Amino acid sequence: MKKKKILFVGAEAMPFAATGGLGDVLGSLPAAIKNADPKGSDVRVVMPLYGQVKEEYRKEMKEEKVFTVRLAWREQYCRIMSLKKDGVIYYFIDNEYYYKRDTLYGCYDDAERFAFFSMASLSMLKQIDFIPDILHAHDWQSALSVVYLKTLFSIDPDYAKIRAVFTIHNIEYQGNYDFSILGDVFALGAMERSIVEYGNCINLMKGAIVTADIVSTVSPRYAEEIRDPRFSHGLDPILRENAYKIRGILNGIDYVYYNPENDPVIEKNFSSDSIEDKYENKLALQRDLALPERCDVPMLAIISRLASHKGIDIISEMIGGLVSKNDIQLIILGKGTPEYEGFFHNLEKSFPDKVRAMIMYDRDLSKRIYAACDIFLMPSKSEPCGLSQMIASRYGAIPVTRETGGLYDSIKGYWVDNGEIKGNGFTFAGYNSYELAERTDAAIALYNDKEQRFALVKKIMDTDFSWKVSALSYLEMYGELI
Ligand code: GLC
């Protein structure tokens, strides 16, 4: 049997440029799939060459090809650069006019920038002489690569053979645009209009859902939730019609990058056999943040975008009471809406000996917090998969989560059955601050039962959240198409 050839198309990948979980996944899943395939697969990735990509990576890149990409009436420069990471070739679409910006997304011309990305990614295949068996596109930014493949490119026999998978990492962002740009920006004609048409405008994600051979999401639970109007942001009718091709595969995390046993940025390395060493990390963080240096105080953490759908609204309702009535410390790391940034600033002002709010993103600091803290709060309203609860577990921080999406699939409620520990966190179902407060109280109470706590911490650290199992599920899914 010949090697499977797979091309990932996505807007971000760690460590080159990333803003969130999508970047984590595109930085680690391709190599995991390659390594999991006993027959060996040829997995490659294509993403834009943003101005943010650091010189240390640019230095390693080699120029593959320079050509012109036609997008409607435009003729645009396109250079393909490449480098190899963990056995996976990453291609970068270089066009400084589109990608040398202050941000990865959120520009006035994102529609054009990502239409160009999709068109360039497909055009590239002939130029570099790599025709994959599977094109695997992720989220709205690369949705057009699936639409183009199945429409404009399908008359070419090489492209007609390619099967397409579209993965939804977050259904909230669908790529909605006015019909006035259908031809001029998206290079689509009247024939393709109905494919991308939804709710009286262009919806790129809908276009990819109806044209892809398989649609996947990042957890089994979310695969069900998105067929329900409470989660679908309007797309549930389309997902119900296409239910036969929807799959849900839980994400994993990069076990090399997230490894408390040899992580260079944390104070003291530790494993599930040396949980006591977590204290050194707690003391070091307390010292860094000028909090009272005490091992015995339970430390809670929130590392998140500070937005209501991450559960920050219900946190804000209960956290003041929790901090005032308990001997605890609370660390917040993240940015978000001015309302919540201000809220946590004020909380720190009200409880200067207990709370530190760091309104920023900092990956190294986040790992120091995971390593230091005892309880990790993640009560999302919806969560396609969520990676933080897995990272927290690996670093021995007990998660308190709401039962939704990937949180439901990865964290089960703790209880003790005849001396045996069941579950791996504290979970609740209703989206309200009472249940969150009640489960957080329970997690704090467990902190004072050192023996039980250590047993649970050991269990969560030993839970396997690596890509191993999921990579096999992806291979199986590709197998359905080849
Ligand atoms: C998005 C989702 C998050 C998921 C990540 C990676 O950021 O919101 O839940 O873990 O994508 O798939």
Image: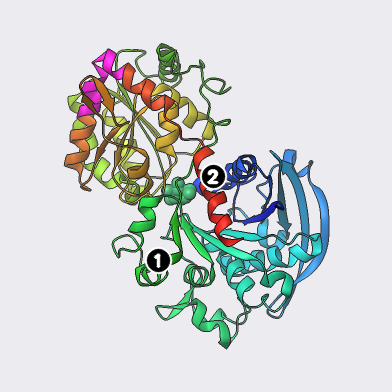
Q: Secondary structure at mark 2?
A: helix
Find residue 401 and report its image quarter.
Answer: top left
- x%, y% of residue 255? 54, 32
Point out the stretch of residues depicted in magenta. Answer: 442-453
Residue at figure coordinates x 73%, y 74% from the top left: 157
Whether the magenta-drawn stretch holds residue 100 is answered as no
Whether the magenta-drawn stretch holds residue 445 is answered as yes
Distance Cα–Cα, label 2 vs label 1: 22 Å
Q: Which residue is mark 2?
A: 472
Between residues 177 and 423, which one lies in front from this camera angle? 423
Residue 121 horizontal side relative to residue 445, left or right: right
What is the crowding at mark 2: few (fewer than 14 residues within 10 Å), some, or many (at least 20)?
some
- x%, y% of residue 61? 78, 46
- x%, y% of residue 448? 24, 16
Name the residue furthest bottom: 190
Q: Main secondary structure of the magenta part?
A: helix
Residue 243: give its label: 1
**Looking at the picture, which amino acid does disc 1 mark?**
Ala
Q: Secondary structure at mark 1?
A: helix
Residue at figure coordinates x 45%, y 40% from the top left: 387
- x%, y% of residue 288? 46, 20
